[in-house]
Amino acid sequence: MFLKIRSVSFVAALAAGVLASQVVSAADSPKVSTFAPAKDLANQADAYIKSLQDCVADEAEYKDSTGKIACESNTLVVIALALGLHDQDNKYKASAGAVLKAAQGVAATKDFASAKKAIAALAELKSGEGKSDAALKWEKVASLPELMKQVPTVNTKLTMGLAPASFKKKAKGTAGYSAVLATIANASIFDTSATKDAAQVKQWETFSAAMRDNAGALNAAIHNANQPAAADSLQKLTKSCEDCHAVFKPEVKK
């Protein structure tokens, strides 16, 4: 949501029609496939686990990657939640609860030794053969500030891959990135820690739903090999983030 600051009020944004997405509750959250295909999320889960392993290749690498570890592990938490709740079968569906818990364990580490151990335990789940009896539901499971820090990182990769010359070649990656942004947005609906009152809760939920739906539309355009539609969806996604940022500043407290 937080890509750029704009001095746009919530009322002005509403009048402009950029908040048309329907706000959802935990009870009526849309099927995950409508905004993030399971295959895209599973590919991203694999990539995040590999990236985290690289971050603890040695202590020097760890020291340079502490911020990255925090962002990526929290992002993996919500990806695991989405895969566990997914309406499409996927390799992580049965083990999603265990992956979620392991990723939370990585996020909680404070030193090289504990991070390396926690990431090794997480990597053992990459095969998808594990099982978990954890009861999953859409709720706050990750650090909102770390998720918000990850948004521009993912968005930059996404934008670079949408250029006409590289659109088809980069489709697998960009589909994954858009699915991650949509998942972060949907997860954000259930964490209202950045709000001050009931009115702001509604604004936050609406902005989050708009981001999710625009990212989902972008994902669909990528899968349909429609570069003009993807470019249009990216503009709408960016605007939904800017409008949210105009109300909710980036200094989200933990």
Image (cartoon, rainbow, N blue to C red):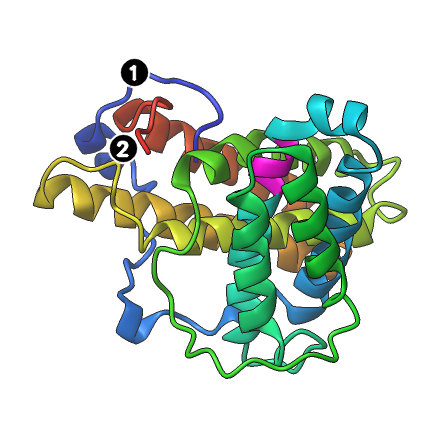
How far, Cα to Cα, is label 1 from label 2?
Answer: 10 Å
The residue carrying pointer 2 sits among few (fewer than 14), some (14 to 19) or many (20 or more) residues within 10 Å by Cα, namely: some
Relative to residue 106, is residue 43 depicted above or below? below
Q: Earlier in the sequence, mark 1 or mark 2?
A: 1
Instruction: Indicate the position of residue 58 as horizontal and vertical percent values.
Output: 83, 32
| Direction from residue 251 to residue 149 in the image, left or right | right
From the viewer's side, name the closer residue of 184 and 216: 184
- Identify the residue under disc 1: 7
Q: What residue do we see at 39% from left, 18% from top? A: 5
Instruction: Indicate the position of residue 168 as horizontal and vertical percent values.
Output: 86, 49
- Identify the residue under disc 2: 13
From the viewer's side, name the closer residue of 122 and 196: 122
The part of the chain drawn in magenta is: 68-72
Relative to residue 13, is residue 37 depicted above or below? below
| Direction from residue 212 to residue 51 in the image, left or right | right
At label 2, which amino acid type do we have? Answer: Ala
Instruction: Indicate the position of residue 6 as horizontal and vertical percent values.
Output: 36, 18
At label 1, which amino acid type do we have? Answer: Ser
